[in-house]
Image: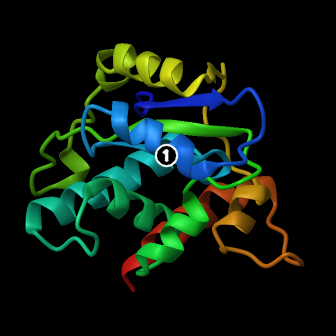
C-alpha cells in the first residue's frame, strides 16, 4: 500500500489559538484539496485511502454532504453526517501538539473499487507543497506514519471512555466508524 499524501507535523508548542493556525494554513494552501487533520484521527494508510476512495465516489456522483472536499473528508473520517461535529472530532483543536497535513488527490476511481489503482506517487508529488505549508505553520515534520490508537477512537467518538479495543482490532474499528458516516 502506498503512503497516503499525509505529513505528520509537530507544532513548537501546543496550539492555543487554533483560528490563527487555520487562517495561516488556509492562506497558503494551494487548494481546498489540502487540510489539517487531528493527529490521532488518521489511524493508518488503509483508513486514509478508504476514506479518500469514499470521498472520490461521492464527488464523482455529486452526492457530497459538505460543500467542499476537505470538509467532506473530515466528515467521513469523523464517522458523522454533521459537518460541525466532523470539525470538532477530526479537526485540530486547542491543546493539540501534532497534526497531519493532508492532500486529497483528484485521481478518478472509476466503477470498480477493487480494480482501482492508487496514485502511488501522490506523496512524493506533493512533498514540496507540504514542506512549504509546514514552514508557514512553523511546524516540523514527524518521522512517523499513522497508527491506530484508542486515543483516536475516543477523539472520534467511536468508543466511550470506559470502552477498550485490543490493538489488533483498532484499525477495523476506525474503518467501521468511517463506514457509518453515511448510515
Q: Position of residue 102 (x, y in %)?
A: 43, 38
Tell me the residue at 28%/58% (across/down).
Answer: 55
Answer yes or no: is residue 137 visible: yes
Tell me the residue at 55%/44% (across/down).
Answer: 20
Q: Nearer the viewer, residue 152 or 26?
A: 26
Judge left or right: residue 15 versus residue 174.
right
Say which residue label 1 marks.
22
Up the image or down, 14 lies above or below 80; here it is above
Q: Position of residue 115 (x, y in %)?
A: 19, 45
The image quadrant where one finds the C terminus is bottom left
Tell me the residue at 29%/17% (across/down).
Answer: 125
Judge left or right: residue 170 versus residue 71.
right
Judge left or right: residue 72 versus residue 156.
left
Answer yes or no: is residue 79 visible: no
Q: Position of residue 97 (x, y in %)?
A: 74, 39
Name the outermost residue toward the right.
162
Quadrant assignment, res 2: top left
Other residues around mark 1 within 10 Å, as few (<14) / some (14–19) / many (≥20): some
Secondary structure of the residue carrying tag 1 is: helix
Total number of numbered discs in the rendering: 1
Q: Position of residue 98 (x, y in %)?
A: 69, 38
Up the image or down, 176 lies above or below 94; here it is below
Colouring scheme applied when the structure was drawn: rainbow
Quadrant assignment, res 71: bottom left
The image quadrant where one finds the N terminus is top left
Tell me the residue at 51%/65% (across/down).
Answer: 87
Amino acid at each position: 500500500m502506498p503512503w497516503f499524501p499525509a505529513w505528520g507535523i509537530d507544532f513548537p508548542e501546543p496550539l492555543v489559538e487554533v483560528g490563527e493556525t487555520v487562517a495561516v494554513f488556509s492562506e497558503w494552501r494551494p487548494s481546498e484539496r489540502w487540510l489539517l487533520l487531528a493527529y490521532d484521527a488518521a489511524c493508518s494508510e488503509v483508513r486514509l485511502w478508504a476514506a479518500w476512495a469514499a470521498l472520490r465516489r461521492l464527488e464523482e456522483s455529486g452526492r457530497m454532504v459538505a460543500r467542499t472536499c476537505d470538509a467532506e473528508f473530515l466528515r467521513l473520517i469523523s464517522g458523522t453526517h454533521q459537518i460541525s461535529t466532523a470539525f470538532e472530532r477530526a479537526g485540530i483543536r486547542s491543546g493539540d501538539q501534532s497534526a497531519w497535513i493532508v492532500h486529497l488527490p483528484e485521481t478518478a476511481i472509476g466503477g470498480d473499487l477493487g480494480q482501482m489503482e492508487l496514485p502511488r506517487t501522490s506523496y512524493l508529488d506533493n512533498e514540496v507543497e507540504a514542506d512549504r505549508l509546514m514552514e508557514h505553520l512553523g511546524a516540523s515534520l514527524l518521522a512517523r506514519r499513522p497508527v491506530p490508537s484508542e486515543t483516536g477512537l475516543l477523539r472520534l467518538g467511536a468508543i466511550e471512555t470506559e470502552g477498550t479495543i485490543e490493538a489488533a482490532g483498532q484499525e477495523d474499528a476506525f474503518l467501521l466508524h468511517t463506514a457509518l458516516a453515511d448510515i
